[in-house]
Amino acid sequence: MGIYVLHTSDTHLGYRQYGIVERENDVYDVFGEIIDIALREHVDLVVHSGDFFDSIRPPPQAILIAIRHLRRLREKGIPFITILGDHDTPKRRVLPPLVLLEELGYVRLVGVGEQRLAYTVKTRSGEVFVAGISNKRKTSSSVLKLMLKKLSNPPSSIPSILLLHQCIRGMCIDYELELGDIPIGYTYYALGHVHTYKEFEIGDGVAVYPGSPEVMRVDEFRAQSERYIVLTELGKGVAYRQKIRLQRVRPQYELVIDDIESMELKVKQFIADIVSRGRASKKPFVYVRVVGGEYNRSKILNVLERFLRRVVLDYRVYIEKKSDDIGITVEGIEHVAKPLDKLELLEKLLGDKSLAELADTLIAILSSGSESEALRESLKIVLERYDIDIEFTPTSIARASTKRSSTRGSLDLLLRQQSRMR
């Protein structure tokens, strides 16, 4: 008989997408589902790979809900082990909020400081060796690699788990680690930071990014609308895993409008399709993508408010112009009269694929209907990407949103500067 472990990550408790209260509650709801599954499946251990909270200053309701659900695990004798992600790691010398939960006996932190990199956990089905390192920025990658070397010899007599909240090459835009930097010999590699489900092998072990339990951004929805956790059975040197789809995730859809004349009909057909799927427990969130042509934004919003508003929680509109027949000059080479994919066009302009992917993400977010929330998300992504230590308040965001065009120019300048530095 093995040891049953539930693996989740990137719960981001306290996150409120577009400032919508219901979206914050969605994050709490799906966290409750994760705990329900842990209890239903009688797991021996829960591991979390970082970004438990969305911020180092989570709202009181996020802390309260975390305590209520974690108490249910403690009452059943199920340990909850986590590391710090980039969102819940303070940039200054203050305590992370998870330290409070550890002091109260609800979680156990690993990978906080060099003295707490690993320990043996006793569960009702046996012992597990758990090691971990909290998130390290790219500027600290050399420190990260040295810490990993200290964890290079897990015991072979019992199952072992390594927790990391990092990007590995090939998994996301920017990365801190190569696959070869990660020590082999662990039974299971519990990874976090990537918000979509990915699994692969490291040596004889299984490595999994379960992804975030809720969709956080439009690019995540487009990449993978379903959300998962992992139930794994650990034996001596082997891990059997089961990918479990979460059911309380709010449904999200994309409506593409490419002809303004038939827009009203298309919206009605879209609504009929939603209704035909059956009555969901939650109203869907919809991304409306308007492509091609010069459209009147107020006319589009008028149609959406008349027909779509009553059947959805909310929606966001993204207007994209076709890039057909655009002539551009890149490094002295003329490209004309060729339909270009948006990512291809951005890569030609910026001269770098990873910058093009970042720019594509920022464009999608900044095209959102909510200026302050779009700006907040965009700034968060840029600050994390370039390891900039700046804190911003709702007031400063509101002021900045009145100068949105100049902000877009600043982001464009930053991208171009980074392109020239490469």
Image: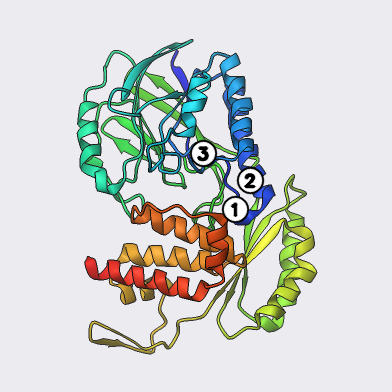
Q: Secondary structure at mark 2?
A: helix
Depicted 337 relative to depicted 107: above or below: below
C-alpha separation, residue under disc 3 versus residue under disc 1? 14 Å
Residue 407 left/right relative to 261: left
Percent coordinates x, y for residue 223 in the rendering:
49, 55
* 254 or 15: nearer the viewer: 15
Q: Residues within 10 Å of mark 1 (few under 14, many from 20)?
A: some
- Identify the amino acid type marked 2: Glu
Can you say which quadrant of the picture contains the C terminus? bottom left
Q: Which mark is residue 53?
A: 3
Percent coordinates x, y for residue 274 in the rendering:
72, 58
Residue 181 left/right relative to 210: left
Depicted 253 relative to depicted 50: above or below: below
Q: Residue at x 62, y 21 (%)?
A: 72
**Circle 1 sits on which residue?**
17
Does residue 354 appear in this view?
yes
Q: Residue at x 26, y 48 (%)?
A: 139
**Circle 2 sits on which residue?**
24
C-alpha separation, residue under disc 1 versus residue under disc 2? 7 Å
* 276 or 14: nearer the viewer: 14
Percent coordinates x, y for residue 206 in the rendering:
35, 32
Lower sequence index among marks 1 and 2: 1
- Identify the amino acid type marked 1: Gln
